[in-house]
Image (tube, rainbow, N blue to C red):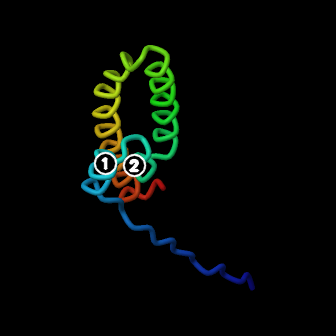
Amino acid sequence: MASEQPQRIVVTSTKSVGIAILLTILFGPLGMLYSTVPGGLIMLAINGVIFLLSLLTAGLGAFLFFITWPVCVIWGAMAVKSYNEKLVAGQR
């Protein structure tokens, strides 16, 4: 007589797109860590390079933050949407 293994159910809550957008607007790449850790680390590295560039060029490279910040917001929102879709589909 084979013993049946109990079925395990893992409950994970979805992430909020609104919170992801708010955190990313307020904190940029650091806020992306809520929605996507690899994406947040990538954007932290890119913004670190931009910061060093700004120091070397007496602030002329700082305008690049106006490009990377909206990219962070969009990437964070899309990452949460993708995470939630995979979670609902049972792939996570």
* Element carrying mark 1: helix
Under mark 1, the amino acid is: Leu
Q: Residue at x 56, y 75 (%)?
A: 8
Quarter occupied by residue 25: top left
Q: Secondary structure at mark 2?
A: helix
Task: Please tell me which residue is depicted at 52% across the width and 31% down the height of the picture.
Answer: 45
Where on the picture, by quarter, is residue 75?
top left
Residue 1 vertical position relative to residue 29 in the rendered view, above or below: below
Q: How many marks?
A: 2
Q: Is residue 81 left or right of residue 31?
A: left
Number of other residues with Cα within 10 Å of mark 1, as a class: few under 14, some 14 to 19, many 20 or more: few
- Label 2 or label 1, whichever lies nearer to me, is 1
The residue indicated by pointer 2 is 31
Residue extending farthest front: 58
Query: Residue at point 46% right, 38% down?
Result: 39
Image location of residue 89, percent across then percent down: 38, 56
Q: Earlier in the sequence, mark 2 or mark 1?
A: 1
Q: Quadrant of the N terminus?
A: bottom right
- Amino acid type, label 2: Gly
Say which of 10 and 28 sits in front: 28
Report if the CB atoms under discs 2 and 1 are less than 8 Å apart.
yes
Residue designated by label 1: 26
Q: Answer few, some or many: residues within 10 Å of disc 2's Cα (few below 14, many 20 plus, some between 14 and 19).
A: many
